[in-house]
Image (cartoon, coloured by chain):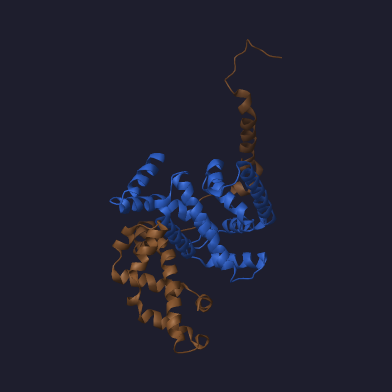
Amino acid sequence: MSRPDKNIPKGYFDNLPQKMSDLISDLKDDVQSSAPHLYRISKEKSYKVPDGYFDQFFNSLNIDQSRTISLISRFRPLVAAASIIGLVTLIWVSGILKQDQDIEMLAMTDVYSYYYDNIDELDHDLIWEISEEEGSIEESLFEDLSQSELDLFEETIISNLTDQELLDIL
Amino acid sequence: MEKLESQILQMIRDDQSFDRGFSMLVKNYQEKLYWHIRRMVHFHEDADDVLQNTFIKVFKNIKGFKGESKLYTWLYRIASNEAISYINKNKKHQSLDMESHLTHLENKLKADEYFNSEKAQIVLVKAIEHLPEKQRVVFNMRYYDELSYKDISEILETSVGALKASFHHAVKKIESFITQNIDHVKA
């Protein structure tokens, strides 16, 4: 069967099935013959855009807002650490509150209010300790944060806890 | 194209030139992505919303783009996903069957100042709308955007064989729909 006297390109027969398959499929793609009615309808855009839309599109993008969100996501590793701090602090808060009233009777708004009112009292050194233990958070991330950013960050964590989570902790 | 992509990516990777690089990216791909989205959502206001969401998502994730696929296939994937999410979100607010949906769409298109409401075009839009979601996306990418199967395969993470089958079925269904509505078509 072999025809050593005839030279063919290397790998010709290996590639032939794929080549034939592509050829057949391309023929099937021939909309003109397989779908003449579709082919008769113009492919020209039936949709239009307002004048100058593309010239102005970039300026209409709300990138500045995205930058803020992007900044927050940059600090996402901190959320994990700060969540732990949030939990620890909540337990501490619950300890204090239990001295005065039954925790089951405490309104959730009171818990949040207490937290926000005492945001300055949060132990930032503890954040450092946890970040060093975890080893996954760069110290520079903390250095970049202003006090107001750190406060905002901690408020966000508290807001993200559900009422049920708070109650479970307490 | 590839040279432009690598130039954009190089600029984006450098904080100093990030803004210029991102602006270049938007200006280069906005039209292609817009038309891709517009064919899926039909109306300019919706397409504008989805395009904005697409580029904001790109902005947030571009630094993590490793270049394992072509930039424009990555952009198309985000745009397709955003458009599909948008459509599905809007579907939840409507509980119309297909016939009512198509009638509603036709009426809206006829009233839309940014649509050329020739009957043939409306029949074609309805024929495409009639397709299952995946076939619709494949048909639009292949027929209108004229993307290669290899690129569509990268965008939709589907085998080339399956895409060819999808396109083939889509064309057959569209042709059949148009044939049934042939009286209305004066191309």
Q: Which residue sits furthest top? A: A5
Q: Quadrant of the rendered structure where residue A93 is?
A: bottom left
**Displayed quadrant of residue A69:** bottom left
Examine the rendered structure and indicate whether residue A39 appears above or below residue A22.
Answer: below
Q: Residue at x 62, y 12 (%)?
A: A6
Taking the spot 50% from the left edge, 66% from the top edge, the residue there is: B112
**Residue A98: image location, x then y, percent:** 46, 85
Q: Colour of chain A?
A: brown
Residue sitting nearer the eye, B47 or B179 = B47
- Residue B117 position within the rendered picture, expressed as x and y whole percent measured from the top left: 54, 61
- Given residues A128 and A2, the one toward you in this image is A128
A151 vs A36, nearest the viewer = A151
Q: Is residue A106 above or below residue B162?
A: below
Residue B107 visible to an observer of this rendering: no
In the rendered structure, the answer to whether residue A152 lies left or right of residue B46 reads left
B171 w.r.t. A125: above or below = above
Residue B23 visible to the viewer: yes
The chain that appears blue in the image is: B
Residue A108, percent from left and from top: 48, 83
Q: Relative to the observer, which residue lies in front, B160 or A158?
A: A158
Q: Seen in the image, is B76 located left or right of residue B177? A: left
Task: Say which quadrant the N terminus of chain A sits in.
Answer: top right
Figure label count: 0
Q: Is residue A166 shown above or below B112?
A: below
The quadrant in which residue B58 appears is bottom left
Residue B110's spot in the image, x, y percent? 55, 65
